[in-house]
Image (tube, rainbow, N blue to C red):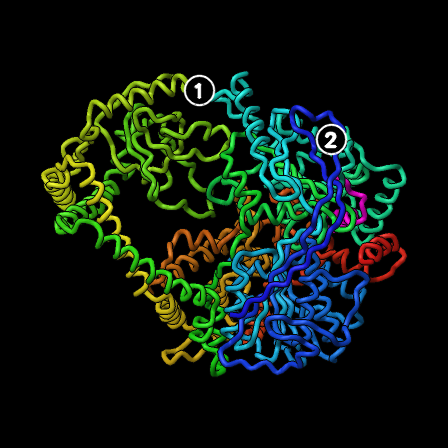
Amino acid sequence: MENATNAEKRKSPEEISDLVDAETKNEELASKKQRVVARTCVHEVAVPNGFVPSKDESIHGTLSDPVFNGEMAKTYPFVLDPFQQISVSCLERKESVLVSAHTSAGKTAVAEYAIAMAFRDKQRVIYTSPLKALSNQKYRELSHEFSDVGLMTGSEVLKEVAWVIFDEIHYMKDRERGVVWEESIIFLPPAIKMVFLSATMSNATEFAEWICNIHKQPCHVVYTDFRPTPLQHYVFPVGGSGLYLVVDENEQFREDNFLKLQDTFTKQKQMGGNQSGNSKSGGRIAKGGNASGGSDIYKIVKMIMERKFQPVIIFSFSRRECEQHAMSMAKLDFNSQDEKDMVEQVFKNAIQCLSEEDRNLPAIELMLPLLQRGIAVHHSGLLPIIKELVELLFQEGLVKALFATETFAMGLNMPAKTVVFTSVRKWDGDSHRYVGSGEYIQMSGRAGRRGKDERGICIIMIDEQMEMNTLRDMVLGKPAPLVSTFRLSYYSILNLMRRSEGQFTAEHVIKNSFHQFQYEKTLPDIGKKVATLEEEVAKLDASGEADVAEFHKLKLEMSELEKKMMAEMTRPERALYYLLPGRLVRVREAGTDWGWGVVVNVVKKPAPPVGSLPATRGSSYIVDTLLHCSIGSSESGSRPKPCPPRPGQKGEMHVVPVQLPLISALSKLRISIPSDLRPLEARQSILLAVQELEIRFPQGLPKLNPVKDMGIEEPEFVNLVKQIEKLENNLSSHPLNKSQDENQIQSFKRKAEVNHEIQHLKTKMRDSQLQKFRDELKNRSRVLKKLGHIDAEGIVQVKGRAACLIDTGDELLVTELMFNGTFNDLDHHQIAALASCFIPGDKSSEQIQLRSELAKPLQQLQDSARRIAEIQHECKLEVNVDEYVEAVVRPFLMDVIYCWSKGASFSEVIQMTDIFEGSIIRLARRLDEFLNQLRAAAQAVGEAGLEEKFGAASESLRRGIMFANSLYLRTLNASAKLEITVKFTESYIQ
């Protein structure tokens, strides 16, 4: 790896100012400074062993210091930044390059240069992005600049292609999209060079090394963390007043202001504004729409407009919340009459392609008054035509306040002057957590428009006290690394088997994956860590080594046996009798011990509706338990943080919903609990009682004996209890258990921990990731044989040939339905409805009650899915049958698609579900693609009847608003109806 750094410093006068904190919020912005802007970039290049450069250094410079002194393929109306100059020089060397830079830094200029080179050299170039909206936007822009631009989906035609541009390559860590790009990069011929554009990522060099390794060619990295427009980051405490500058435009954290911010929460608590037991205290915004949060957002938006800090993007992590916040701006109006007229004209032109009935949809009618006032909403659930219209109006400055989800920050180049975060926490599908630094960088990067704003402004709304380091790490933390999500799919395996093109085997793909490359890079580090730990063990006193090993072994055995025992004791039919209010239970989740808590109530989850899937085993009962949690942990609406009780330790008791299997011990003890647990004092009295019991029982609280107390008398279980009792006696009599020498105890404990870690690391080194993939490949091949996709020699059969053409939905399951006759018995409307179950999308919160003509096909689908899951499990793949069926069968829009296929209007079908209109349309369009794949698969295996049905099902969907053309594509046609929109588009590009 050769390294070179090119840095250029330029001075640029910029006005900087503090916004207002709580004490000075009414003062005018007065101070001006000079700011030195360092437009630096780092250039590195990964070079394969034995590579000999052949470029003329007088024209191209060297590998480590590329320059270009020839005639440019494209000129720009501005001076290129250093990172752009170096990137262009790398392209002229005909070598791949990864450009990693912040949003709005100008990465697109590099992609445009690669395209201009291809046109100059009479070659082709492919541009690809992970987002349809981004692809549409780029298609529109490139069509205006270059003459020969077309759309392509999944083509194998690579003749004359010189460059492939991968925009937003950091999306490769996405579980669904990532593997497609990873395989594409592996399969590209060496003659084709690549341009990777990415937001800043911390392991760009590692990615370039992988490209160099698999293609045996140089790959450059041009990295800059320069922001063309510096950012100022402010915090607004919910329920308080004023803004606090926490990070200035020089990226300096202002501790003094942070401490003032913390004082506001202390004062609020003292004034009773944050009382325990009130679920709405603290103005929790992420729960969407309480009065406090709404009025705070109203105040912020009003202040932004008064100070001319618009346009502003207000980010929320909930689609419904975006709409609620926008609607709460009813008293605000940001557009002049001329602007209102222009918005109305553009709006009417845009919806001309819709039928009269669709133009009268509430989702369309209600949007115009909002847009005319300069306010808009943008999220994935909107009608596509409205979403694109909002984007066009925002670009032209006719939308001043945009309420959006984080997807607006992904890819689309639509910056604003100010960005507001309505919460610092988001739900990630498992728990509420703080926004990661990578996510914050992506969204905050939308603040500050190059050439328009001297600085961008970020305002973070928080409703709870935060640790200083938590906020500092979020705002100033490193960008996230790109981590491979490579996995083996049946689709890929079958296609590789069918083609059998020499090197392109599944083994070849596994060996060359970024996943494998990253794993192998960690091995030397693991070896060093093992050596360091072994040195530490050698330095520790070697005496008593056998005792340590024995003691550690006894503890592990005890832990394993206790897990088995508790699995039996917590079976609902046994445990519920004892889980009465006041019972002390110990709770353990993964590696976290929550300590002893007190049962408040036990609730059973409602049974799933008919036609839906059963709940995951062991999770049908929830035990509401008072547990010791860190102070304030439940006020934010988030999941309480573990804080095991110790005498003198600060904490609060909160009611936490606990799944039955997480109970690790049942005590014989019960205590009385107050009838009203809302007051903090009532809950703290329980904490004192639990701590008093722990002092009274220093050897541990007495536990229920499963045999004597619970009457579990199965011979195997009785034997298990006896083994545990024997181990307990051995542990209690062990010399380490009786040792009074604290230093000796700590030494023994550390030795045991180090030895355990050494064994773990050595096992990790032995268990090659490559071997794991090989084992998985072998097991997946067994599944394919059992299902008849391949024969004993690995030759792809008819069934497999059909699966080779299906990459949407579960290829095994859908081919099973094609070959077991399920589809043959259905008409094309039923087929469209059943096929919708394969498309990922939003879940409905309503109970699913299907008509008879759909309930039976759904049951057949679920039965087939269960059979396939069981076969995979038999073939030693880690598949949970119930979870698999729930994941691959999504029946939430079966009724909607069925009725739409039979001719119902869009206004009728949206009344049938609580799922967003835009989500329905997105599913319908993906369903159309899926049905066309099924049609191609049926044609390939000679099923003419099915081919006709799949075609009819697809045709029945393609009408009305569901398949209205994108505005981005329509604006390319200079029709009179869309003249204004065309004008907007052209001015934006210029």
Dividing the picture into quarters, in which one does residue 914 lie? top right
Q: Is residue 390 magenta?
A: yes
Gap between marks 1 and 2, in whole Å? 37 Å
Residue 1 image point, x, y percent: 51, 70
Up/down of 265 relative to 811, above or below? above
Q: Nearer the viewer, residue 413 or 221?
A: 221
| Image side of residue 660 versus residue 839, left or right | left
Q: Name the residue under label 1.
A: 678
Q: Nearer the viewer, residue 445 or 348?
A: 445
- The answer to whether residue 718 is seen in the rendering is no
Q: Is residue 516 magenta?
A: no
Q: Magenta stretch mostly in which secondary structure?
A: helix
Up/down of 863 relative to 779, above or below? above
Q: What element carries label 2?
A: helix
Q: Nearer the viewer, mark 1 or mark 2?
A: 2
Q: Residues within 10 Å of mark 1 (few under 14, many from 20)?
A: some
Up/down of 46 relative to 914, above or below? below
Residue shown at 32% from the left, 64% from the top: 765
Q: Give the residue type at disc 2.
A: Met
- The answer to whether residue 615 is seen in the rendering is yes
- Pointers 1 and 2 in contact (CB under 8 A)? no
Residue 971 image point, x, y percent: 81, 58
Stretch in magenta:
383-402
Residue shown at 54% from the left, 38% from the top: 471
Dividing the picture into quarters, in which one does residue 561 lie? top left
Q: Give the residue type at disc 1.
A: Arg
Q: Nearer the viewer, residue 833 or 636?
A: 636
Q: Name the residue under label 2.
A: 303
Q: Which of 766 and 984 is in front in this view?
A: 766
